[in-house]
């Protein structure tokens, strides 16, 4: 099993939204490195930290799991869709997504500020300056350290 962190803005789609729907396609990723993780690395059952970004207190707010293997993100093919990409072709898809399933909300938000204070998390891409990816791997040690903070 692998561990991941996936960012979402709570006013667009937050942990409460995922809890309501249960399973949701994680679409709209338009970064090649993140696309490769969705397409090639994520496996059914992998665990995910759900991270709220672009908010007053950015941080990890819940846990989800990967419910499907990566598959083409068809929002790229729809001219009416927010994430339309005219260069993406259904015969040779450029963008991928997975379905994410709600597991639980954390008992409290583990803030980015708090994570930056822990030596065991200093190699985590999230805490490094300049990391803008919406999806990133989390090591087993980092996963456990964050759960211990809860």
Image (tube, helix red, strand yellow):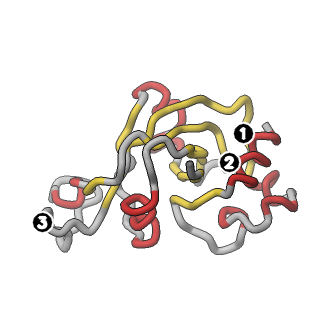
For this view, does 45 lie left or right of residue 128? left
Residue 70 position in % (x across, y down)? 34, 54
Residue 122 position in % (x across, y down)? 79, 65
| Distance in Å between CA atoms under marks 1 and 2 | 6 Å
N-terminal of the pair, mark 1 or mark 3, is 3
Residue found at x 64% / y 74%: 130
In the structure shown, which secondary structural element does the residue marked by tag 2 occupy?
strand
Residue found at x 29% / y 59%: 83
Q: Are marks 1 and 3 in contact (CB under 8 Å)?
A: no
Residue 40 vertical placement versus 99 (above, below): below
| Distance in Å between CA atoms under marks 2 and 3 | 38 Å
Q: Nearer the viewer, residue 40 or 110?
A: 40
For this view, does 147 lie left or right of residue 69? right
For the C terminus, the quadrant is top right
Which of the numbered marks, if any, corresponds to residue 91?
3
Residue 38 vertical placement versus 131 (above, below): above
Q: Which of 71 and 17 is in front in this view?
A: 71
Q: Do the residues labelled 2 and 3 touch (CB within 8 Å)?
A: no
Mark 2 Cα shell of 10 Å, populated few (<14), some (14-19), many (≥20): many
Q: Which residue is the site of mark 1?
A: 109
Q: Which residue is the site of mark 2?
A: 59
Q: Do the residues labelled 1 and 2 touch (CB within 8 Å)?
A: yes
Residue found at x 28% / y 53%: 71
Residue furthest left as drawn: 91
Q: Within the image, what quadrant is residue 33 found in?
A: bottom left
């Amino acid at each position: 099993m692998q561990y991941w962190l996936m960012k979402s803005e709570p006013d667009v789609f937050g942990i409460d939204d995922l809890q309501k729907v249960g399973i949701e396609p994680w679409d709209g990723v338009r970064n090649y490195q993140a696309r490769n993780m969705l397409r090639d690395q994520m496996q059914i059952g992998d665990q995910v930290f759900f991270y709220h970004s672009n908010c007053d207190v950015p941080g990890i707010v819940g846990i989800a799991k990967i419910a499907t293997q990566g598959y083409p993100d068809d929002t790229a093919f729809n001219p009416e869709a927010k994430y339309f990409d005219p260069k993406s072709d259904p015969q040779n898809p450029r963008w991928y997504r997975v379905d994410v399933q709600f597991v639980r909300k954390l008992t409290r938000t583990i803030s980015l500020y708090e994570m930056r204070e822990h030596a065991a998390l200093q190699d985590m891409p999230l805490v490094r300056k300049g990391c803008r990816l919406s999806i990133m791997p989390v090591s087993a040690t980092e996963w456990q350290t964050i759960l211990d903070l809860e």
